[in-house]
Amino acid sequence: MNQELMNNEQLKHISMNPNEAPIIVGLDIGTTKIAAIAGRKNEYGKLEILGFGRANSNGVQHGQVLNIDQTIKAIQQALLNCYESNPDLEINEVYVGIAGHHIKSLQTRGDIVRQDPEIEIQSWEIEQLVGNQRKTFIPAGDQIIDVIPQDFHVDNFQNIKDPVGYNGVKVGANFHIITGDRNAIRNINRAVERSGLRTKDLVLQPLASASAVMSDIDMEAGVAILDIGGGTSDLAVFYEGILKHTAVIPFGGENITNDIRMGLGVLKSQAEAMKVQFGSALADEAKANAFITIPGLKGMPAKEISVKNLANIIQARMGEILDFVTYHLKQVGLDNRALNGGLILTGGGSQLKHLIQLTEYVTGLNARIGYPNEHLAANHIDELKKPMYSTCIGLILKGYSDYEHKRKEFDNRFRKVEVPESLKKDDVAETVAPPVSAETVDVKKRKGLNSFWDKFKDGIIDMFKEEGDQEIR
């Protein structure tokens, strides 16, 4: 990446302010790209991007790390580009997204009888309740990635968001448990560690993407998030403020490209270029008399490709992906009458022309494209506002959820780094905030750090994940 380097002496002083937010790095290891983004929240709760790098991904197929050496080289290239955008960054630990065919989810219900029902419910009892779910029987070779409480109940009182402070004999909850193949998890951790980094946490990619593109209003109304990546399409469904379902659909943008390559008899690079420049997800919208000229190989005559045929191929595969979405929504009993927030499309594959129209036709849900703009501070380059970076932005938000709940675990002696000029837009004026008191700023900091993650994890699960982190590592 050709990003302008910065020469700012102010970047070199060390901040000892314990109230200043840390720099958190998200690492998105995808099938087609690997992205590393470093960010920090300002006092208004918006992310300032301090470093950005990406590289082509070679060792990942369908969301799984298969060739560790090639993946390491791609991660290191992305980190190098990130350092070039801001040489004053120091990156040691990262939040990593995980997806792939091996990801599964299941619903469980757990209860505990309290030792002393005369006193109010304490946080350690919730820790015990969540910890018990990590002993849930799962197939051999799988590993629990995350245990997410959906809603709690105390005696006969149902649908409680936070039971701490309630009084009762028995407390329980419904849980959404996410599992993955142990070897696939190990390969991700190996690739990250051998790149000189430490995995702070593994985060399911559809949950990361959802946190970047979804608002609290969407979550309350009921919404489905579909992240169309290179190797997989990741689905997360929310209803009444609760995570109801997650799924990894085994098709993505790479499958569409391969269909074009096989169906039209062209090179993979030509298929990708045609998909991006001339592709449409709705064949009826493509011009029947339009053609694309492909140069012949080694003296062979040029090939004429019908734009209509190209759109037919794309629509067939995208329709298959959307059929999977409809199937998963029916599984959990949610449809267009329940999900008033509709379907939010994000990821690199969401940029196909006429995809919204096809989505609404197949699923019956209102659809729109989800951008991570809402969480970004003003004056950043447009590249970072594309849907393909939703997962990476969401990983940073997940890190801030951890920071809010486990602030003491973070080292406050981090480097003071400013937003580099190469990551700013020259034609956008900086937003000037009115003067505020120190007390007001402190309140805004606390409000800004209340993220989407606090809603569906109920502000509890992040406090008790140390055991799970050790298992993954």
Image (spheres, rainbow, N blue to C red):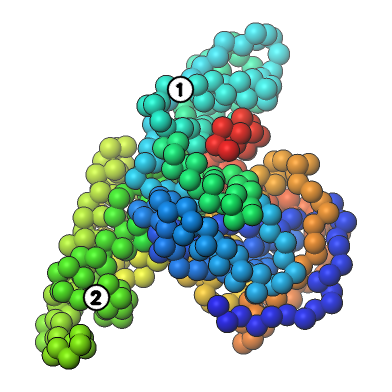
Q: Can residue 374 be seen in this view?
A: no
In the rendered image, residue 113, in percent from the top left (x then y), is placed at 57, 10
In the rendered image, residue 50, in percent from the top left (x then y), is placed at 68, 68
Name the residue at 51% across, 17% down. 111
Which image quadrant for residue 355?
Answer: bottom left
Q: Is residue 313 left or right of residue 142?
A: left
Which image quadrant for residue 394?
Answer: bottom right
Name the residue at 40% across, 30% down. 141
Identify which amino acid the numbered label 1 is placed on.
Answer: Thr
From the image, which quarter does the C terminus lie in? top right
- Residue situated in front as seen by the camera: 279 or 58: 58
Residue picked out by circle 1: 136
Residue picked out by circle 2: 267
Q: How crowded is mark 1: few (under 14 residues within 10 Å), some or many (20 or more)?
A: few
Name the residue at 47% across, 53% down. 68
| Location of residue 85 with respect to 399 vertically, above or below | below
Identify which amino acid the numbered label 2 is placed on.
Answer: Leu
Which image quadrant for residue 9?
Answer: bottom right
